[in-house]
Image (cartoon, grey):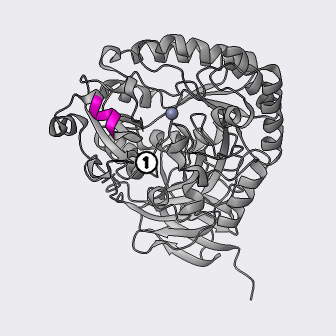
Amino acid sequence: MMRPAHDLVLRNAQIYDGAGGAPYPGDVALTGDRITAVGVRGTIAPGSGEREQDLGGLLAVAPGFIDAHTHDDRIVLDAPDMLPKISQGVTSVVVGNCGISLAPVTFGDSPPPPMNLLGDASAYEFPNFAAYAAAISRAVPAVNIAALIGHSALRLATMRDIGEKASPNEIAAMQAHADEAMAHGAIGLSSGLFYPTNAAADIDEVTRVAGRFAQHGGVYATHMRDEFEHVLDSIDETVTTATAAGIPLVISHHKCAGVHNWGRTLQTLPKIEAAASHHPVNVDVYPYAAGSTNLRADLVTDTYRIMIAWSRPHPEMEARDLVDIAGEWEVDIHEAARRLQPAGAIYFQMDEADVRRVMSSKLAMIGSDGLPHDQHPHPRLWGTFPRVIGHYARDQKLFPIETAIHKMTGLPAKVFKLEGRGRIEAGAYADLVVFNPATILDQATYDQPLRRSIGIEQVYVNGRLSFTASAGVVARAGQLIGGRN
Ligand code: ZN
């Protein structure tokens, strides 16, 4: 008897191609780690799969979602099941954002903020990228990983005084790290000029470092210097830097933060789109009007709500509002914030209309920016992707579901040069999500952030069934992707 042509055929599905095309009824076949055939119903011969599964006509098949912006650098090693992400249909995560990456830096003492968002000194054990890549191979996380190298990590690894601009020798040392990282499969550079570990770098320093990543085909993602009053200046700085370095640009978690800036995406998006007409520029965005990072004195204000995500000295205050803590302690919010340090917070600092406007931009990819080590994390960690599809596309009709899917599949695959990902077509990697378009929705909230999304039925990573709604994580088949991989 002849061997069947395919390992598995998923029949009778609504197929989203990842390129933004409308869904169509059809079948998808896989063999090994690849999609081997795809077509409208009836084009894949009956019985040609060793196993066949009828999805009943109502379930959808889409490329596995790519989380364009994460801080999953350490959690992929420590909790490789990656349940918060794979339960959303995510099959690949981009790590190393906002200037923060595990490689190539180590610490004898506590890592300074924001590096402490990934853990304490014991989390940082990779003096070069090859060591981090080897750790990923050993851990075999449930999702694929594409890794950026953080400019703060480079600065802390090479500089005598990070309060200054890097010297020519220090820049050369960072460029040598760029060569090593890109040779071992990194995909580019990130910066976090907003943060004290990165802020002293000027356009010249960033351009020289980014330029070396560009020589290796890298991309550049940046948490800009200012997302508040000076956001337009920051966009100018960012575009100038990327253009001079000759490197494709991603503006991270684009927002206009602070009540005085609400509505200003009407100015920022046209500026970004104008830049995109002569240079590769994209943005990532999460579908919430609150952000989250370290608890910082300069972000403490009574003009928006602030919720505590974690506190080293006062874990009992997690999940509570800063204003209530201050009231209980009978101090002002600034003193309360000081006593909670080191800590993380959720800032309700954005306007919903701005969030919708950014998400709707054709340049926008979906990135969760989830913080997996926080005790009471922002709900974006568990809810981002089903929320964009179920809440914003299906229920609010902000854009069609196929557009939502494109923003989390084909578009990030192209921007981050993830060859063979983000599309349903013969020859592509079999990273697939089977979901119910009628029920898919986030369940995580600010009060209950650890609730699993609904409507994700099955997730395949590199051809392996890795998650089901009933059994949870059933296999781990992720690998380092992008770059030289
Ligand atoms: Zn950031």
Residue 14, horizontal then vertical, whole percent: 46, 56
Residue 297 in the image: above or below residue 477: above
Residue depicted at 38% across the width and 50% down the height: 383
Q: Quadrant of residue 174?
A: top right
Please state if 141 lies on the left or on the right of 339 as rendered. right
Q: Quadrant of residue 176?
A: top right
Residue 275 in the image: above or below residue 463: above
Q: Quadrant of residue 207?
A: top right
Q: In the image shown, does 174 or 6 lie closer to the viewer?
A: 174
Please state if 91 lies on the left or on the right of 188 as rendered. left
Q: Is residue 397 visible in the rendered structure shown here?
A: no
The residue under label 1 is 385
Residue depicted at 54% across the width and 40% down the height: 69
Q: In the image shown, does 95 or 457 lie closer to the viewer?
A: 95
Residue 297, horizontal then vertical, whole percent: 38, 27
Which residue sits furthest bottom?
A: 1
Q: In the image shown, does 256 or 43 lie closer to the viewer?
A: 256
Q: In the image shown, does 202 or 21 lie closer to the viewer?
A: 202
The answer to whether mark 1 is within 8 Å of ligand 1 is no
Residue 360, horizontal then vertical, whole percent: 43, 29
Residue depicted at 78% across the width and 52% down the height: 130
Residue 337 among magenta residues: yes
Please state if 316 lies on the left or on the right of 12 as rendered. left
Element under disc 1: helix
Q: Magenta region: which residues? A: 335-339
Residue 225 in the image: above or below residue 134: above
Q: Please state which amino acid type lies under the numbered disc 1.
A: Phe
Residue 133, horizontal then vertical, whole percent: 73, 54
Q: Is residue 319 visible in the rendered structure shown here?
A: yes
